[in-house]
Amino acid sequence: MTGNIKVRTLSVVAVILICIYGIIGLPTSLDELKQNIQKNIRLGLDLKGGSHLVLQVQLQDAFRAEADTLIERMKEELRKANVEFADMQRNDPQTLADAEKIQIDVKGVPGTKAGDFRTVFNDTMGTDWLLTAVNSTDYRLTMKPSSVLKLKQDTITQTLHTLEKKINGLGLAESTVQPRGRSDAEAELLVLLPGVDDPARIKQILKTAAMLELLEVKDGPFNTREEVLAKHGGVLPLNTQILRGEARAGGGFYLLARTAVVTGRDLRDAQAVQGQYPAQWDTNFVLTQEAAKRFERYTEANVGNRLAIALDKVVISAPRIDSKISDNGRITGAASAEEASDLALNLRAGSLPAGVEYLQELSVGPSLGNDSIRSGLISGLIGLIAVVFVMLAYYKKSGINATLALILNALILIGVLAYFNAVLTLPGIAGIILLIGMAVDSNVLIFERIREELREGKSVPAAIQAGFSKAFLTIIDTHVTTVVSCAFLFIFGTSAVRGFAVTLVVGLIANIFTAVFVSKLIFDWELSGKRQVQTLSI
């Protein structure tokens, strides 16, 4: 019996040391101790202060881009197949609700080429789009419902991952990007930025699509868009587009090739670098191996011509190609080192598949977070003192047993949260306070069962053994039902509710260990030093 107690004691001591190490590490000074606690106990936005952003992915942008891509592919394939057509255009859905109503109208296909037209369509996009004949020469293309759903999901997922890359690149700890989780919140994402109380720069970085394109300059710059068209007979030349130039790059309008030589997808890296002059900052980018070969061939064949660097459909510079360029390029003209770094970050993260619009912004100051921590600690301490007082008054010395189990329960809970890098929020503190009552409740069940066994005339060791054995199933039953409830809170709740659920589940699991294993061990230690115990202080 004594050997068994020693093994169990060593197990409890090991758990205590592991939890303490997870919380404070191995500090060598008081300052390091404070730093380790702040690092290991991660505070959420409502406690640390920061920004809470709700943004909506503009899915209609992705649908328009998908249709534009299809139009370009269809035109190219129809030319190869010698199938004439008069016009091919898409509609222009402007709202999220109209995104899936995207359609492409093809007009003027000769009746003799109808079969060839359908063949080209089936080979090009027949798996994602439906083809409907409007009349003998006109056709309408609409997306299949399954393809609509897939494009929505892919766009939201890619947007979420791109935003995560941008936030991680800024070095913001404990930040979260996740779907908002409400049934009516279509395409809405929730961004939590603890420690950020001025989110203006962050919002600009997140919203920037950062779609980089290197495009051949056909003509320009011109003062107005009308001048570009007037020079070319009022008609936009085939496979060209007109883009506006940035004001600090001279402004104007450029006639550019529609197909980019290099895009942001071809980048391997991007970094802010010092410019030619001390106050000048540029953004240097490096291409992937395949893109570098392609870019090298293009620049070698176009020495003396100009190449426009366009970011989000705005020309930021249009330098002349002086020599062959292989795997890197430079974007000049940044107003500051921060602007060059932000551009590099956006390029590394990749372009957003669709625009985003901010629907809600909530900032929590650090002082408010400190007030929440102070209020939570005070309420928890008052509750703990009250519970300990009642347990000592009602169960006498056995109340000490319950108090020790309660303290160990809190230690295990905080240690587990630290090891799993969980974020402690205000609802999490509420969960801890709730656990104080639930943890004591388990001890109450055990102690009352022991009292019943003693009243029936059993000896103290037998009463303790029977009390723990008979109360065990009841404790498991109550804890399992609560864990199931927490599972539903975690699956369907918001981030704040999830924090409450996680804290409560971890505390409940720890409570089974402390109330059953540790509390029983303390009773066994008390009995092991005495030959025969006639009474129990309970």
Image (cartoon, rainbow, N blue to C red):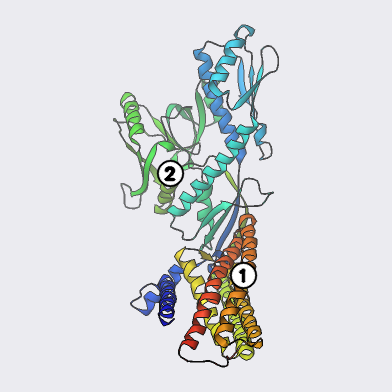
Q: Nearer the viewer, mark 2 or mark 1?
A: 1
> Mark 1 and mark 2 in contact (Cβ < 8 Å)?
no
Which quadrant of the structure image shows residue 364? bottom right
According to the image, label 1 marks what residue?
473
Q: Can residue 175 be seen?
A: yes
For the N terminus, the quadrant is bottom left
Is 501 rendered above or below residue 469?
A: above
Left or right: where 480 falls relative to 211: right
Residue 418 drawn at (x, y percent)? 46, 67
Q: Position of residue 334 (x, y in %)?
A: 41, 47
| One can see residue 354 in this view | no
Residues packed near mark 2 inside 10 Å, few (<14), some (14 to 19) or many (20 plus): many
Total label count?
2
- Nearer to us in this view, 410 or 34: 410
* Residue placed under numbered mark 2 in the picture: 347
x, y percent for residue 301: 32, 23
Distance Cα–Cα, label 2 vs label 1: 58 Å
Residue situated in front as seen by the camera: 455 or 347? 455
Considering the image in quadrants, where does the C terminus appear? bottom right
Element at label 1: helix
Amino acid type assigned to the residue bearing label 2 in the image: Leu
Q: Residue at x 62, y 73 (%)?
A: 434
In the image, taking residue 485 as reference, residue 202 lies left or right, namely: left
